[in-house]
Amino acid sequence: MFIKVRTEKCTGCATCVASCPYDAIVMHEDAARITELCQLCRACLGVCPEGAIIEIAEESDKKEKGQGSGVWVFAEQRDGKLAGVSFELLGAGRRLAEDLGTSLSAVLFGRVSSGPEELLHWGADRVYYCGEELLQDFNDEPYANLLTRLISEHKPEIVLAGATPIGRSFIPRVAARLHTGLTADCTSLQIDPETKNLLQVRPAFGGNIMATILCPHTRPQMATVRPRVMQKGEFDKGRKGEIIAVSAEGITSRTKVLETVKEVSEVAVNLHDANVIVAGGRGVGGDKGFQALFELAEALNGSIAASRAAVDEGWIPYRHQVGQTGKTVGPTLYIACGISGAVQHVVGMQSSDIIVAINKNPEAPIFNIATYGIVGDLFEILPLLTRKIKELKGQ
């Protein structure tokens, strides 16, 4: 869509120039001209006495019709086990499908121990399932080829995937082949009640703002969603649905996965599945401070996390980092020690059930989202807290 001045009708009265709040209209050779500053506010359309300013629709502005309907979720599996983000996407997808009055489908590539039926129990109405050997181990090319084929055949309105290494790797390929938009790392998804478009919310400009992105003219609307920011749906063992077998016939790959090597560290770090997390920021001060955090985490049978500031200082490895440039977590209990509460960190842990903040600065932003706040010196508070927990556990 763009605004155009029909120069043959323009008399050069300059009425439109004063009407533009963006200074996007200038006079050139006794006629008005629209510049690249135009924001399509349309304020100028009704002020021209000659009717010389018109709105032109482009081909890309015509919303695709006959595009089908339905919400699809790509169900990720690793080593034959469904990833937790798959159940979170089904929870979000069910809510979106109900708002649109449509169905929810899951797409599963590769065999899983629980079978595709588990996806039905978690809320899917149908599952498109391909368990062929070619797709057992993740490989960008065959995954992208088959998912593109399925979307082209069935034309869903919305397609969601996890913002995991797998989702981030091949979902952009699918969007590019379908000539549609893709919003990465979403933290919220909603349906616009008026237009029925998908409102895709994600951090932008280093996490300083939350941007709402729309894809109004092409389908499907595609988004990857951060793990642990969406609530799982309800599990119903008796829930039934349709399982549709999908063939990979004709799908080829120029590469083959020979071996998958997992990184092994001295301390296992699985923050995504942790129920209790003790996190430290710049206020921890260094290795001594993190030692106090480790003792508290051990007493709680929890895991250790950190803000980017602590990782940048070299106090703890990157694999512990929570936030926009790290992991997204949603434990039952999150204890933030010496963390100021910058939005870049908050987007990675704000879905925690209970947040306890310990900070000597009473004005720290972390207290705005904390369930409980303790103002004080963490070097005094943490040993007392650890000792009390051990007493209660009889240690």
Image (tube, rainbow, N blue to C red):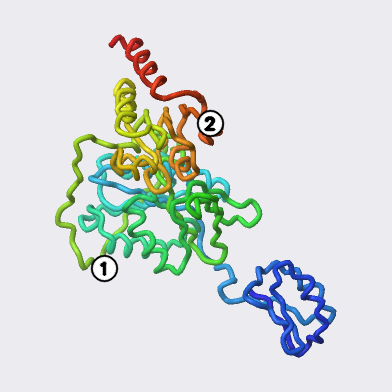
What secondary structure is marked by label 1? loop
Location of mark 1 (residue): 250
Task: Name the quadrant of the N terminus.
Answer: bottom right
- Residue under the image location 47 percent in, 50 percent down: 186
Q: Is residue 218 left or right of residue 381?
A: right
Looking at the image, the residue that sits furthest to the left is 258
Which mark sits nearer the N-terminus, 1 or 2?
1
Residue 44 picture location, percent across and down: 76, 72
- Tag 1: amino acid: Gly
Which image quadrant: the C terminus? top left
Foreground mark, 1 or 2, reads: 2
Position of 291 with respect to 91 (left or right) is left
Query: Residue 318's spot in the image, x, y percent?
Result: 31, 44
Q: Residue at x 32, y 14 (%)?
A: 390
Relative to 58, residue 370 above or below: above
| Residue drawn at point x = 41 percent, y = 25 percent | 378
**Position of 247 relative to 29 (above/below):** above
* Badge 2 amino acid: Phe
Task: Give 12 or 128, whichever is nearer the viewer.
Answer: 12
Give SS at disc 2.
helix
Camera sees residue 370 = yes
Label 1 and label 2: CA atoms lie apart by 56 Å
Please give the label number shown on residue 184.
Answer: none
Mark 2 burial class by Cα count in 10 Å: few <14, some 14-19, many 20+: many
* Residue 109 shown left or right of residue 49 in the figure: left
Discs 1, 2 touching: Cβ within 8 Å: no
Are there few (<14), some (14-19), or many (20+) residues within 10 Å of tag 1? Answer: few
On residue 367, which mark appears? 2
Q: Quadrant of residue 228?
A: top left
Q: Residue 124 in the image: x percent, y percent?
A: 43, 45
In this view of the protein, can residue 354 be seen by the observer?
no
Where 53 sits versus 389, above or below?
A: below
